[in-house]
Amino acid sequence: MRRLYFDHAASTPADPRAVRAMQPYFSRAFGNPGSLHYYGQEAIAAVDAARERIGTLIGAKHFREVLFTSGATEANSLAVRGAVAFFRGAHPGVARPRIIISSIEHESVSEPAQALAAEWGADVVALPVNREGVVDIVALKDALSPETALVSVMHVNNEVGTVEPLREIRFMIDAFRKDRAAGAHPGPYPLFHTDAAQSFPYYYLDTELLGVDMMTLSSHKTYGPKGVGALFVRRDDEAFGGAGGPGTAAGFPLAAQTLGGGQEFGLRSGTENVPGIVGFAKAAEIAAAARGKTSLRVAALRNDLWRRIKTAVPAAEINGTAGDAKAPHILNVHFPGHPAQDLLTRFDRMGLAASSGSACRARAAAPSHVIEALGHPKARAAESIRFSLGKGTTGRAVAAAARIIEKAVAAAAR
């Protein structure tokens, strides 16, 4: 059976060039980056070179602004928990620091925020989105308060592909900061974080242009290896050099969440995954060089897939936006009257891999919170499937996938 992979939002195959770049660091250049001898120096040089490459690709002012983690989930957790912990240390008079997120964030952002609500009494505000998945800017303006430590809004939604207006959010935060400067809690708050795990292969992620203080990246969504990610953190020695209390690193507005050896500038202890970091940097370079052509080609294939699905299943509808504010690789479709889990099982038996939403929650078989946040009922969320394409997707694969979808829906209707 020829198998068709339409789940690139869950994971992408590692580019062979990234795999080749990793090979020496498994066996020949195997040293611990923390060691002072030749083998350790060889390893830390590779880590720092990768850090500088990724920093250059995202417009970081200094390579030290790139922190490597075990993946996007850890990076998001460090951004949320670390930023709020730092804020509490710098503002002991604030009893309930506020965290503002969107209602369609990945669980690796929303769950740490809710955990802080349970542990510390943090005030978590989930901003509503419209039917297309775009965050409500007016609601953000109303939610900003002197106690706000963090605003976290993802760049590309992993389930419906909506691209959020980060620059508009940044302008609103800047205006609030100016007003706040004369208030009871001065300082460069709230910090602005974005989860850009889905974005790198398709968008130029310049941190200055986007206006973010922190940004999460994922290797295995960028044709690199699993088990590695990165968190960009804007340094400000003047603002954050001495604030935040123990477990913080000068210049960073974060408190470490993993303690031990003090790696990653004291903010993420644990021996660095040298092969993964090297492979991630190589994959990022490859993706950045091709993203213009990749975006156009993948968007055209996604549109072709939707036309074929709509012809085969006239009742089908797109979840989220179908316009320009949509990532090129994601298509989320509602199949009325057909439970997603049943269709996905039929698809898989016929050789088509897709998903009902985030891979992190797939085994829970719960309806997508994203679809519900768009204003749709649970029934629609339970009947929706995400197809996500990648740089290896072909026109023939799209045509074959559409035929499988048509057959599976017809068989389910009998």
Image: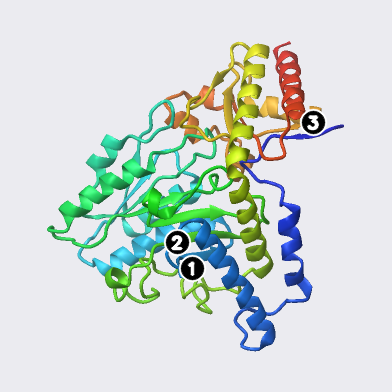
> Dividing the picture into quarters, in which one does residue 329 lie?
top right
Compare marks 3 and 1 and give the one earlier in the sequence. Answer: 1
Residue at the (28%, 45%) spot, across then down: 171
**How many discs mark residues in the rendered view?**
3
Q: Secondary structure at mark 2?
A: loop
Percent x, y of residue 354: 68, 33
- The residue labelled by disc 2 is 60
Position of 196 compared to 127: left or right?
Answer: right
Task: State the SS at label 3.
Answer: loop
The residue shown at (58%, 50%) is: 288
Q: Position of residue 389 (x, y in %)?
A: 65, 35
> Marks 3 and 1: which is nearer the front?
1
Query: The residue tagged with tag 1: helix, strand or loop?
Result: helix
Residue on which disc 3 sits: 351
Sequence-wise, the earlier of marks 2 and 3 is 2
Q: CA distance from mark 2 to mark 3?
A: 42 Å
Marks 1 and 2: CB-CB under 8 Å? yes
What residue does disc 1 label? Answer: 63
- Provide residue 412's location: percent of width, then percent of height: 72, 16
Tag 3: Cα neighbours inside 10 Å, few (<14), some, or many (≥20)? some
55 left or right of 35 in image:
left
Cα–Cα gap, marks 1 and 2: 7 Å
Determine whether 320 is above or below 314 in the image.
Answer: below
- Establish if 129 lies above or below 383: below
Quadrant into which the N terminus falls = top right
Residue shown at the point (65%, 40%) measured from the top left: 8
